[in-house]
Image (cartoon, coloured by chain):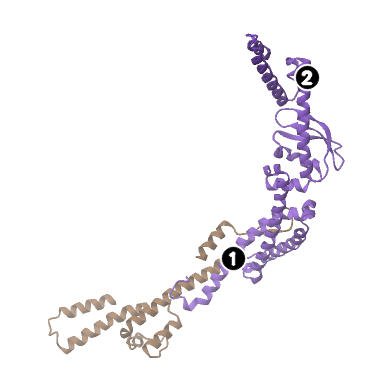
Amino acid sequence: MEDETKKQLKTLKDMKVDKRANAYCGVLDEIKKWLIFLPLIAELADQAMRDRHWDAIRKKVGKDFTIDDNFKLQGIYDLNLQDFKEDVEEITDQAKQEAKMEKTLAKLEETWKDIKFEFYQHKNTDVYMIRLTDENFDLLEENTN
Amino acid sequence: MQSSRYLATFETEVERWTRSLSNITEILTVSAEVQRNWAYLENLFLHSDEVKKELPEQAKDFVFIDEEVKRILKDAHAKQFTITFCDQDWVLKSFENVLSKLQVCEKALNKFMDEKKKCFPRFYFTSSSDLLDILSNGSTPIKIMKFMSKIFQAIENLELKAKDADRPIAVGMHTNVGIEYVEFDADLKLLGKVENYLQQVIDSMRSSLKFVAAESLKRFHQHGKEKWLTMDPAQTTLLINMMNWTKDVESAFHKLGSNKMAMKEAHSNQV
């Protein structure tokens, strides 16, 4: 869609019309708006977006909306996101970084919930000494950093 | 993760993990040291009468240490999972507490060994574990015999009389280089502390060798060189041989003034 819009922009510019005509300027503005709008839409569609991020967007644009299956492109378009380009990018970036962190944390949980000590018997007693396998010890060092 | 500028949202959780993992690292370090020290000292403080007698206070403390170490390790074994065990607040504290107590015991033990070394310097030749073994078995001299080669060069063991008695009597020494036996000039009952009777053994060795050397010198003149050569311990034979050689050459020098052949005669005496 982005590419097509760019093509349209080119076609428009190639047209032999009065560049100062109202119609020409109107269409040009509209196309430019879409060119900013479309990449933002792509960012917003990212799986990393959580409710807290949508809240941040609502606050920025000062409008309320509900994200569900009935939410139409028109709804987003009406938010005039192109006026908040940098804010929106900041929020989606944060969403992605946070998603990465969430994944790392989940992985830690997953890893460590299964790690056991390696027990070795002390002489012939019922005392068992503890240590980590080299593999798990490396994992610990890796995870600590 | 901690340095990320997007930390805010997950801060609590990230902090929890950071704490948890660094805690595990610390526990592993301390527990490794505790386990090593405990295993090394356990035998001495719980089973060696000598150590118990010499270091009664630490031996008493060690009873507590021993119970504590076993209690902590038992809990680890019950929990199985590293994170479950380490996330308990008391674990690191208990390990650290028991480690500091172990270090006090170890220090006392080292001081004890240092004193023994000063008292009988040949103990410096032995390793700590051998020395501890020697000190622990000091009151049973027969058990000390296997360490003789570590304390005295070229000595395998002492010949003991009345081996069944608590305190046997040393009557001579065996070498571990070839086969040679030197009898002591007097019987020596191995009494008192190990560092004391080993010192007496040295005195015995010295006076015995002196006695043997004097006897050997007599025999040299009695039996003639050829027969004498095989009669005495090799070192003594070498020593007496050197003494005779020196004496002969010296008197040859004195005689040279009147007898030009004196040196040649002395030489033919030697070979």
Answer left or right for A4 relative to B214. left
Name the kind of residue labelled 1 in the image: Ile
- Disc 2 sits on a residue from what chain? B
Name the kind of residue labelled 2 in the image: Arg
Is there a contact, CB below 8 Å, between mark 1 and mark 2? no
Is residue B87 or residue B210 the one in the foreground? B210
From where the camera sits, is residue A68 visible? no
Q: Which mark is residue A34?
A: none
> On screen, B253 above or below B159?
above
Q: Which picture quadrant has residue B256? A: top right
In the picture, one chain is purple; tell me its letter.
Answer: B
SS state under label 2: helix
Residue at 64% x, 15% y is: B253
Placement of the N terminus of chain A among the 4 image quadrants: bottom left
SS state under label 1: helix
**Mark 1 lies on residue:** B24
Residue B236: x, y in percent?
72, 25
Residue at 52% x, 65% y is: A144
- Disc 1 sits on a residue from what chain? B
Residue at 65% x, 9% y is: B259
Residue B192: x, y in percent?
82, 45
- Residue extending farthest to the front is B257
Is residue B26 or residue A16 the one in the foreground? B26
Q: Residues within 10 Å of mark 1 (few under 14, many from 20)?
A: many
Looking at the image, is mark 1 or mark 2 nearer the viewer? Answer: 2
Q: Which picture quadrant has residue B270? A: top right
